[in-house]
Image (cartoon, rainbow, N blue to C red):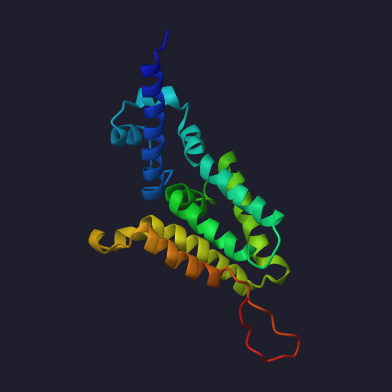
């Protein structure tokens, strides 16, 4: 009969494998990462990985599902809310999600199209499209779509792959990143106002 120690050890191993898998999926890409690579980096055998996860796809789903679920929850709360401050709150919560789940968000934002056949990625893509519609509302323009893509894709890149372009001793801490991301994303995710027909007025922002 399994002991509590063995059960705890299995849970720890499963969590370690998810953590290492996310790092590899975000840095090298899902397609280029093998189960053997994950096993080697985590310090386990490939058979141990397969004991916990039936396939690489199952490991991906287990690793990113919490981030996808939180993303969906943030959107549900935003859509159910009212008031002038809800856009600001949405940006704050999206930034917190990006920081807490940076590798997972990188995988489904940056690699989402190439992995669209996987159910968990299809679910994540649907959530991203839902966020795009929510942000753009009825005034979405091509410029708004571009700004949305730059905002989320750029933030996801910055928090993972983009950090490799800076020296380790010059990287900002998470609090500084949070403040900067909230400021920049609030501006980028605010839809531009369309000028009235025949007007030459330059669009401003919410």
| Res. 118 in view | no
| Furthest-top residue in this view | 1
The structure residue drawn at horizontal position 60% and vertical position 54%, both measured from the top left corner, is: 128
Q: Does residue 59 appear left or right of residue 204 in this picture?
A: left
Among the 4 quarters of the image, the one containing residue 202? bottom right
Residue 140 percent location from the top left of the image: 68, 70
The structure residue drawn at horizontal position 64% and vertical position 62%, both measured from the top left corner, is: 86
The structure residue drawn at horizontal position 36% and vertical position 39%, both measured from the top left corner, is: 20
Residue 27 percent location from the top left of the image: 36, 49
Q: Is residue 190 above or below residue 9?
A: below
Q: Is residue 93 above or below residue 197?
A: above
Q: Quadrant of the N terminus?
A: top left
66 or 144, which lies in front? 66
Among the 4 quarters of the image, the one containing residue 118? top right
Q: Quadrant of the C terminus?
A: bottom right
Among the 4 quarters of the image, the one containing residue 179? bottom left
158 or 181, which lies in front? 181
| Res. 78 in view | yes
Residue 204 percent location from the top left of the image: 62, 82
């Amino acid at each position: 009969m399994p002991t509590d120690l063995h059960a705890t050890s299995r849970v720890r191993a499963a969590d370690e494998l998810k953590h290492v898998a996310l790092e590899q999926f975000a840095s090298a890409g899902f397609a280029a990462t093998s189960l053997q690579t994950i096993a080697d980096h985590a310090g386990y055998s490939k058979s141990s990985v397969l004991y916990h996860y039936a396939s690489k796809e199952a490991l991906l789903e287990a690793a990113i599902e919490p981030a996808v679920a939180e993303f969906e929850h943030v959107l549900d709360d935003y859509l159910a809310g009212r008031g002038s401050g809800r856009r600001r709150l949405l940006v704050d919560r999206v930034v917190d999600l990006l920081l807490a789940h940076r590798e997972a968000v990188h995988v489904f934002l940056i690699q989402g199209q190439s992995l669209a056949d996987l159910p968990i990625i299809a679910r994540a893509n649907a959530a991203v499209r839902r966020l795009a519609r929510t942000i753009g509302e009825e005034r979405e323009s091509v410029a708004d779509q571009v700004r949305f893509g730059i905002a989320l894709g750029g933030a996801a890149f910055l928090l993972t792959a983009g950090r490799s372009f800076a020296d380790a001793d010059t990287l900002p801490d998470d609090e500084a990143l949070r403040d900067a991301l909230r400021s920049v994303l609030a501006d980028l995710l605010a839809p531009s106002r369309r000028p009235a027909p025949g007007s030459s007025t330059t669009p401003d922002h919410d």
